[in-house]
Amino acid sequence: MLKQDENLSFIIEPELSPRSEQRIDMYFSIPNEMGINPQTLTEESYFNNHFKSYLAYNANNIHLPLVRSRFVSKNKGEQQDYRQNLNLYCYQVRLAIDTDIKDTLKIEEVDEFYQRAIELCEQSQSLLRKLRRYTPDDEKLISFYTNADNYLSWHIEQSFLKLLAEGARSSDHAKQRNELMNFCKAEQAYRHELQYNSESTLEDANRITNKMRLLQRLIEHGVVLNRNTRYLNSYLKRLVKGTVTAIIMALVMLVVLNARISFTEVTATLVIILGAIYGMREIFKEDITRIIWRAIVKGRPKWRFQFRNSVTKDKIATQYIWLEYTRFKHIPDNVRKIFSKRRQQNKQAAQWLHFASEIRVNAKEFLPGYDSLQQTLQFSLAAFARNLKKGEGKIYHLDNNKISKQSVERRYQLNVVLSYQNGEEIKYQRYKITLNRSKIVSIELIYNEME
């Protein structure tokens, strides 16, 4: 369930059905030597800068042969219906090509690599033909079609160029490489013939990239749900801060009045006492407020997401988020037992960070033909890596009286226990995440249990 996304991020992608409820809990064991704690990385900072949550229609683990194409032919009806059906198709093609290209690049055997690459090329050509077969006649719809066709052609071409640049190479497969290159050239010529992009845009890599990012956001309209974020405890926090300030001020005034009674005249001693009283107030006010606040919000959700269809504005789902540092003794027994199964050398002094997501789907049904939602929870570890030591060193080898040296990098390990509850079923997993300053080196599933 937990898999690497980019260099320093990982994602979880569960599926959701209509009227379903789901809860995900994650417990991070962060070694103290990494320097992560409530002072160096607050919960609010991590949530605002390093966590993202998305909901989109039925595109989880989709591959090119599974892309649904029947909606593209529905170019009759209202303008918004055509745009949404077109966007659904293009969105699924984009995710499918990304998934399949990534899987193909992992193939090390040359014959198998090129066989799979040619299959992807044929499937991509077929999907592009299906899109172009239903060019709309209505001028109002032409702009939607043009944007989708332009982006999809460019993105697929870029994907195959990446495949050729980073994949296996062999002089025995020159024919296959030429076929793939000719496909890329054909798509480039197709866009040039239709004048999708100006010459000045094509000559500037930044301009063409930014334009395609804009087109990508346009085809996500109606597919990726709009998200509204609300911090749940803002008014409560103000109330707690005001109450603590009022109580401290009352105590300070009481002390001041007593001091004033004891000293009938303004003296240096009285001034020093009053200064000390007000100084103590400033010192302890923030600490007392923080202690009381953490006690009040402990166990309470901190944020709420509401997801709405960007076209109809209907509310589709509501998600609550918890994120807080905790202690090992406050972690549930089942999770503590899983952490306790680690090897002795992995049981380091650590900070414990708890994340929880609880989501409820409000919609009774989704768009026609789509019976599930794809939820994406993305966690970035960039804030963790920022505090790591560079720590590159040397290791020496002795071989036949010859001494050689090799550079080594410093690596750190996070242990993560994930609890996934869907209805009555609960699934527990433990992962070991190895990272350095620049990337996640590996994610290993260590433990998997169903209840």
Image (cartoon, rainbow, N blue to C red):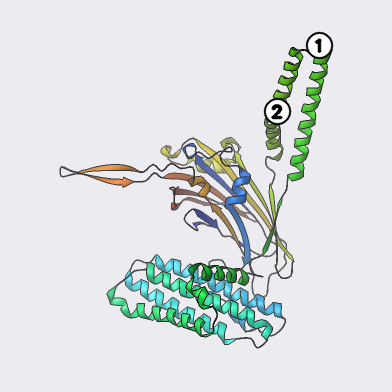
Q: Position of residue 388 (x, y in %)?
A: 46, 43
Q: Residue at x 38, y 81 (%)?
A: 179
Query: Dot 2 lies on which element?
Result: helix
Q: Residue at x 82, y 20 (%)?
A: 254
Spatial separation of the CA atoms under disc 1 and disc 2: 24 Å
Task: Place residue 410 in its image quadrant.
Answer: top left
> Which amino acid type is shown beneath numbered disc 1?
Phe
> Which amino acid type is shown beneath numbered disc 2?
Glu
Residue underneath mark 2: 282
Q: Residue at x 48, y 46 (%)?
A: 385
Q: Position of residue 45 (x, y in %)?
A: 61, 46
The total number of labels drawn is 2
Q: Nearer the viewer, residue 306 or 210?
A: 210
Mark 1 neighbour density, 10 Å: few (under 14) some (14–19) many (20 or more): few
Marker disc for residue 263: 1
Q: Is residue 305 above or below residue 371?
A: above
Query: Dot 1 lies on which element?
Result: loop
Q: Is residue 219 above or below residue 38?
A: below
Q: Is residue 211 left or right of residue 76?
A: left
Task: Place residue 164 in its image quadrant.
Answer: bottom left
Mark 1 vs 2: CB contact within 8 A: no
Q: Residue at x 84, y 13 (%)?
A: 261
Mark 2 neighbour density, 10 Å: few (under 14) some (14–19) many (20 or more): few
